[in-house]
Image: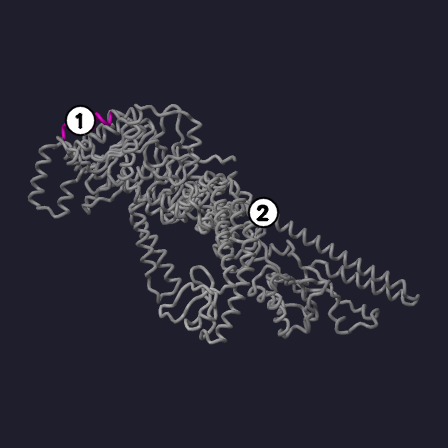
Amino acid sequence: MQLCNGNHFLYPPNSPIIYRQHRKLIRNRKPTVLSVANSPKLGLSESLQQETLLSLEWPTLCQQLSSFTQTSMGHAVVQKAQIPLGKSLEESQKLLNQTSAALAMMQSQPLDLSAIEDIAGILNSAVSGQLLSPSEICAVRRTLRAVNNVWKKLTEAAELDGDSLQRYSPLLELLKNCNFLTELEEKIGFCIDCKLLIILDRASEDLELIRAERKRNMENLDSLLKKVAAQIFQAGGIDKPLITKRRSRMCVGIKASHKYLLPDGIALNVSSSGATYFMEPKEAVEFNNMEVRLSNSEIAEETAILSLLTAEIAKSEREIKYLMDRVLEIDLAFARAGFAQWMDGVCPILSSQSHVSFDSSINIEGIKHPLLLGSSLRSLSAASSNSNPLKSDVENSEMTVGSLSKGISDFPVPIDIKVECETRVVVITGPNTGGKTASMKTLGRASLMSKAGLYLPAKNHPRLPWFDLILADIGDHQSLEQNLSTFSGHISRIVDILELVSRESLVLIDEIGSGTDPSEGVALATSILQYLRDRVGLAVVTTHYADLSCLKDKDTRFENAATEFSLETLRPTYRILWGSTGNSNALNIAKSIGFDRKIIQRAQKLVERLRPERQQHRKSELYQSLMEERRKLESQARTAASLHAEIMDLYHEIEDEAKDLDRRAAHLKAKETQQVQQELNFAKVQIDTVVQDFENRLRDASADEINSLIKESESAIAAIVEAHRPDDDFSVSETNTSSFTPQFGEQVHVKSLGDKSATVVEVPGDDDSVLVQYGKMRVRVKKNNIRPIPNSKRKNAANPAPRLRKQQEDRQSGSAGSNNEEASYGPRVQTSKNSLDLRGMRVEEASHQLDIALACWESRSVLFVIHGMGTGVVKERVLEILRNHHRVAKYEQESPMNYGCTVAYIK
């Protein structure tokens, strides 16, 4: 049996993924074995990656993601932070594509996976040789059926739209060519009733025969015992007939004093009082023996059937586990999509790797801390759900949307991460509690999320490289058990990182070189960064050592960044200033906390004495003015970006409208052509009917009646031609447009908009220009570029113009037996001009259109109301309106000539 080619992902260390049997096959294809020398390094890599995941709070993020899973398998995997991480750029991109496909699926028609059960334990029991119960076997059947339904819904969704096939292909590829074990599912359904959890008679011929024989035997036994019990009751041996089972044998109850009534009976049991004996009559012994034999045979046959089904399930273990692996990946894809939708995430762009050098460029705009964003969203959702119930729904919704948008924009603070392509080391400086470590963690977490196929809580299109390893040294690694101080704990971790690092790795080090003498710490940190510069994809470190910021002046592969600190509020703004060097601002922070002022002033003098040049330079007016100018430029840039976004939105809207004009013009032309063709065909059928009627009547007509028949047929044909003739006032002549002066609020046709209808919002000025509004757009056009809408169209814009322009009065002379009242309405010939099509409308809309048509329809005319069949709701409403309307003289319901149409005669 061929299995579909699955994706192979890197799972976190010690990951007890539920289904992995198929991966053994793939491993066997590559006989490469890790050498003994590489084993310690592999263990070190797994250990360090696990510690990095904990440092970056990856398990906490997975806790948030777990609430979006639909199956117990997916929930268990995500709860344990064991979601797959792509081992290569292609695999991570494949995960992102699956997330995008699931998100598109959720927006069109959500996919329900809740019916899929975790059957791993059942499969293990079957493989170990344990006999499965009917409930366990039915659980396998329900799961197989649910997976098959998932595949059908995915294919149906892809077939609804031609473009959807490519969009849903990442999900379809997961289940494509998989074996859904339909035969096993049908076999289980044939043998077991999964609602009642019983084995059906049809499961085997022997079982059917045994149960039929047992049924006949029980009927005979029951009949016999009823007869004996009735005799005992009539003889006074029991108060009422009693048939029961004791020791797995059917018997009757009898008083102790009347045991003689059953001389050869067998006493099976006695009541607690001893007054009643439960005896098996002699005639029932053979029947009971037969019941015991048949019951044992039935149990043996049911056990054989369950054994057969258990063996079938065990035989299909590999296919089932492989199929469940694919379902697990689909569940994780939809969980990622739901998580992205919840936090309004965007798909990251993973930059491709160059053959020459590693592309470390990062451009992430407005990314928010996902854990803080999650707590913010939960608190805002709780606040919105507890909003004042006395307010209207509109007020509540406006308040909720406003508060949500305001809360999300304020907290957490979004940051920008921008790293150039050639940069290898970024040094972040700034005050304590300023967000250095949080920003560094955000970058590491964003890299992990992109590897796992998760969207990022950022703006626009975030771009970042794919890292093979993400290694972090964050937090205090002091250990009394291992005799490690804070400094030695950091150094031991960095030693491990330097051993594993590659040119495609991301290294995150917090407070590098801290915990020891500052001069030695600076020297050691400088040496470590210079070592990483040549051996790493990107390294991001935080520090309070200002000397590390000077490395940028000597090597362009170094970059500086600083966390912004407001000297006005003496608080950090939590924004990252790329290319800048920040102060620790320890004295300012101590002052804001409430430290003694005299101590602060004394420390200030000591700092100026120790570092006079640097400190004076940082406090100079030039530095402050530059920072102020930078803030102004950033504000102007944000304003310009906002205006540019609005202009682009308007441009795209106008562009879409322009494209739509050509499409709608072609659609209207095709529709008009179709309607004209339909009317021509309809008129031809009517004329052929008149000619056929004329020929039939001509055979039996006398010489005196021929002229009358000819006149009558000519009149009918003339009436058909006249009914299909277009209106004379279809358009307004061009000569009248020159003298036309539009008024405010008037509807006009604008030639430059494809002769579309627009509203005048400003009367012509001295330059003969008119301001009109078309949809959301306001356009100024020349006066000669517009023309008025005809009066007939203004009056009946929502309805067809149902007028027959000429009555056939000459026909009365040729129709001797015709009704005068019907003749006064003219010929009943249905055209597009005397028809009102209500098909596809709701009941309220159809009622409104019919009321308008009846109010403005021409007197003594015929109206064909096309309501169709459907559910009949619109038809019933049409008949009710026609029955009660004062302008309707009478109406005729549908006939074979007018199927789905009712003819109304207007007074």
Residue identified by numbered label 1: 523
The C terminus - image quarter: bottom right
Q: Position of residue 818 (x, y in %)?
A: 80, 72
Q: Secondary structure at mark 1?
A: helix
Residue identified by numbered label 2: 663
- Residue pushed farthest right? 703
Task: Provide the residue span drawn in magenta.
Answer: 518-530
In the figure, 45 relative to 307: above or below? Answer: above
- Residue 751 visible to an observer of this rendering: yes
Callout 1 crowding tier (Cα within 10 Å): few <14, some 14–19, many ≥20:
few
- Number of marks drawn: 2
Q: Is residue 527 magenta?
A: yes
Does residue 5 appear to the left or right of 804 in the view shown?
A: left
**Circle 1: residue type:** Ala
Tell which of 150 and 14 is nearer to you.
14
Q: Position of residue 46 (x, y in %)?
A: 30, 33
**Residue 403 location, quadrant:** bottom left
> What's the magenta bit mostly, secondary-structure-wise?
helix
**Circle 2: residue type:** Arg
- Can you tell which of label 1 and label 2 is closer to the viewer? 1
Q: Secondary structure at mark 2?
A: helix
Checking the image for residue 764, the label placed there is none
- Residue 656 visible to an observer of this rendering: no
In the figure, 570 relative to 274: above or below? Answer: above
Residue name at image x 17 percent, y 29 percent:
522
Tell which of 608 and 764 is nearer to you.
608
Q: Position of residue 771 (x, y in %)?
A: 50, 54
1 or 2: tag closer to the N-terminus: 1
Tell which of 380 and 281 is nearer to you.
281
Residue name at image x 55 percent, y 50 percent:
206
